Image: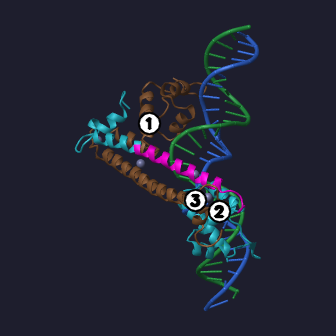
Chain colours: A cyan, B brown, C blue, D green
DNA sequence: TCTAAACTCTATACTAACAACAGAGTCAAG
DNA sequence: CTTGACTCTGTTGTTAGTATAGAGTTTAGA
């Protein structure tokens, strides 16, 4: 299977597959005479796994770790569980930051109304609270 | 005032001031004989304005627009109000995305418990729902 | 006046995960 | 044997800086 068919089967772009290849998440089982990457069927699953991880915003580094960990099936899976835990914490931190941001922006927006001039704009005057721009 | 003092007064790094300079958000009123940037007091206010905008996660492009708009004090401020409105929508979209992400991650995490092996890991098996990695 | 420290300059590389090319080579069908 | 579809590597751009390198400038003390 060449890269284009792999892309079709997994609904990834050819570029991102090459990117994952370069990053070591997947690898071609061989190259054709003309140097085309050749993949076997198992790469479809591996790529779907990667896609699933990316949809959860796991970084390529984290995915690489997961793939490495899955190579030791008899080890404890603590590390995997801990990775997801800390990923959840990252996401929650981002949510908190954004919610506080949203609050500030809403209050900023409420400081202006329609039909004012730039000079009277409540938003601009709040943003430049001390001194003129 | 040289760049170092401006940095101290505004609590910005020298590098980011140079960056804003290059991006056209501020500009040195002159250069010294030895080619050092020289700023006047008004730049402190302008830089505080920029800092305030950045703390609200407004992009450099958006800040540039705001600064341009503030040069026409007698125009209507609709565009400013609209910019903040759409920025709020961006932020809300990001919050929604992250909350859905958080949900998925939590449920993924619940599919595994302590003291399992990698082979039994609920997280890994969910991530590779179809076929083995 | 000389020197050393502190400051500043430009230019480059790096961050994340790709996307979008350019320019060249490969392969399949007609 | 040519045309079009496909693929290759390598480079650049995205954001808002941070972190260097290597060179030049300024300032204070000896
Ligand atoms: Zn993470
Ligand atoms: Zn307004
Ligand atoms: Zn915005
Ligand atoms: Zn587990």
Q: Residue at x 64, y 64 (%)?
A: B120
Q: Chain of mark 1?
A: B
Label 1: which secondary element: helix
Q: In this rendering, which labeled residue sits more in front, label 2 or label 3?
A: 3
Q: Chain of mark 2?
A: A
For the residues beneath circles 1 and 3, the answer to whether they share a chain is yes
Which of the 4 quarters of the picture holds residue D21? top right
Label 3: which secondary element: loop
Magenta residues: mostly which secondary structure? helix
Q: In the rendered image, which residue does mark 3 sit on?
A: B112
Magenta span:
A72-99
Q: Residues within 10 Å of mark 1 (few under 14, many from 20)?
A: many
Image coordinates for residue B1, horizontal then vertical, percent:
51, 23
The answer to whether mark 1 and mark 3 are in CB contact below 8 A is no
Placement of the C terminus of chain A among the 4 image quadrants: top left
Image coordinates for residue A105, horizontal then vertical, percent:
36, 42
Image coordinates for residue B34, horizontal then vertical, percent:
61, 26
Ligand 1 lies under 8 Å from the Cβ of mark 2: no
Q: Nearer the viewer, residue B36 or C17?
A: C17
Rendered position, B36 above or below C20: above
Q: Residue at x 35, y 38 (%)?
A: B71
For the residues beneath circles 2 and 3, the answer to whether they share a chain is no
Q: In the rendered image, which residue does mark 1 sit on?
A: B50
């Amino acid at each position: 299977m060449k890269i284009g068919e792999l892309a079709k089967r997994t609904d990834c772009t050819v570029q991102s597959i090459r990117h994952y290849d370069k990053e070591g998440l997947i690898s071609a089982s061989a190259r054709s005479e003309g140097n085309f990457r050749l993949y076997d069927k198992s790469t479809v699953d591996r790529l779907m796994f990667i896609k699933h991880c990316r949809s959860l915003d796991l970084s390529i580094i984290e995915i690489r770790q997961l793939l490495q960990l899955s190579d030791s099936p008899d080890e404890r899976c603590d590390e995997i569980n801990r990775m997801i835990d800390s990923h959840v914490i990252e996401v929650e931190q981002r949510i908190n930051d954004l919610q506080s941001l949203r609050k500030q922006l809403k209050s900023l927006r409420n400081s202006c109304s329609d039909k004012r001039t730039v000079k009277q704009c409540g938003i601009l005057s709040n943003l430049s609270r001390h001194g003129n721009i």
